[in-house]
Image (tube, rainbow, N blue to C red):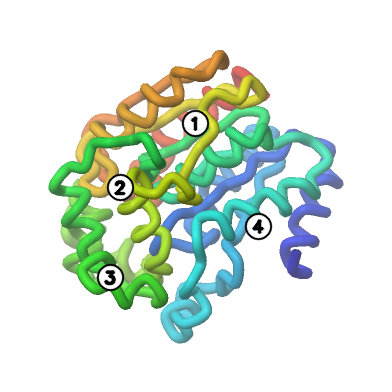
Amino acid sequence: MTTNDAQRIERVNATGRVPVVFVHGLWLLPSSWDRWTAHFEQAGYAPVSLSWPDDPDTVEEANAHPEVLAGKTVGQVADHLEALIGGLEKKPAVIGHSFGGLLTQILAGRGRSAVSVAIDPAPFRGVLPLPISSLRSAAPVLGNPANRHRAVPLTFDQFRYGFANAVGEEEAKELYDTFAVPAPGAPLFQAATANFNPWTEVKVDTENPDRAPLLIISGEKDHTVPWAIANASYKKQQHNPGVTEITEIPGRGHALTIDHGWQEVADTALEFVRRFA
């Protein structure tokens, strides 16, 4: 645990409130949750955006030194986040987007959360649909096997397709300039081969009775994680004896946590969290 991580955890514990942990996905940083953390703090929670290992503090730093982001695997990030959560005095709500949504479900399956919300979550082993739009969104990484060991940036056109297809051109450019950073290629290669690898790190214990209530949120127009993937994840999670729900946000793409409509998504998550934490 870095000094910054320790300070963030200490601040959350000092509030005495229920923690809400936010987990980002590929091509974003913890700062992508800043408006969400303010929103949840106003609602009476103690929010904290947790980093992946070696996350730079700023988008500018990440774009200047992409090498620090390379080589991170799903298992490594999940263990890192679990260790950070272990420092909290109260079991948190956990909210994650994209690969952060996958990590949210991994942590839930380990019994580490009081309630979980997975937003447009990346698929895990056993989730079978593979829509063409998902393949196109992942192509900038999967198209070159050497990218497994690299941090890969998206061009604006790639970001436009994979994240910002449901907003206007001007907003898409603003989102790209404000939030987009290179992402480690390894998790995408792991997800792509998960159903062929019995030892994959991209797996979720969907049957653990200690798994907390889970909501999956899907953006109707998401190219990267379309409804077919989100719904297949939901059906796998229904094997759990706990509360499992899914909802679709109309007209929204993969950038639904950072675009102009973020608050509708945040309020949907907040309503679910309030029911159980």
Q: Which residue: 73% across, 53% down?
A: 83
The residues tagged by marks 4 and 3 sit, at their Cα atoms, a distance apart of 25 Å
Q: Is residue 194 left or right of residue 128?
A: right
Disc 1 packing (10 Å; few <14; some 14–19; many ≥20): many
The residues tagged by marks 1 and 3 sit, at their Cα atoms, a distance apart of 28 Å
The residues tagged by marks 1 and 4 sit, at their Cα atoms, a distance apart of 24 Å
Q: Which residue: 69% across, 33% down?
A: 44
Callout 2 amino acid: His
Mark toward the viewer: 2 or 4: 4
The residues tagged by marks 2 and 4 sit, at their Cα atoms, a distance apart of 25 Å
- For label 3, the residue is 154
**Sequence-wise, which precedes: disc 1 or disc 3?**
3
Please state the horizontal and vertical placement of residue 188, each as a whole percent of the image. 35, 58
**Sequence-wise, which precedes: disc 2 or disc 3?**
3
- For label 4, the residue is 80
Classify mark 2: helix, strand or loop.
loop
- For label 1, the residue is 269
Classify mark 1: helix, strand or loop.
helix
The image's mark for residue 254 is 2
The residues tagged by marks 2 and 3 sit, at their Cα atoms, a distance apart of 14 Å
Please state the horizontal and vertical placement of residue 26, each as a whole percent of the image. 41, 59
Could you tell me if the residues under marks 1 and 3 are in contact, i.e. CB atoms within 8 Å? no
Callout 3 amino acid: Leu
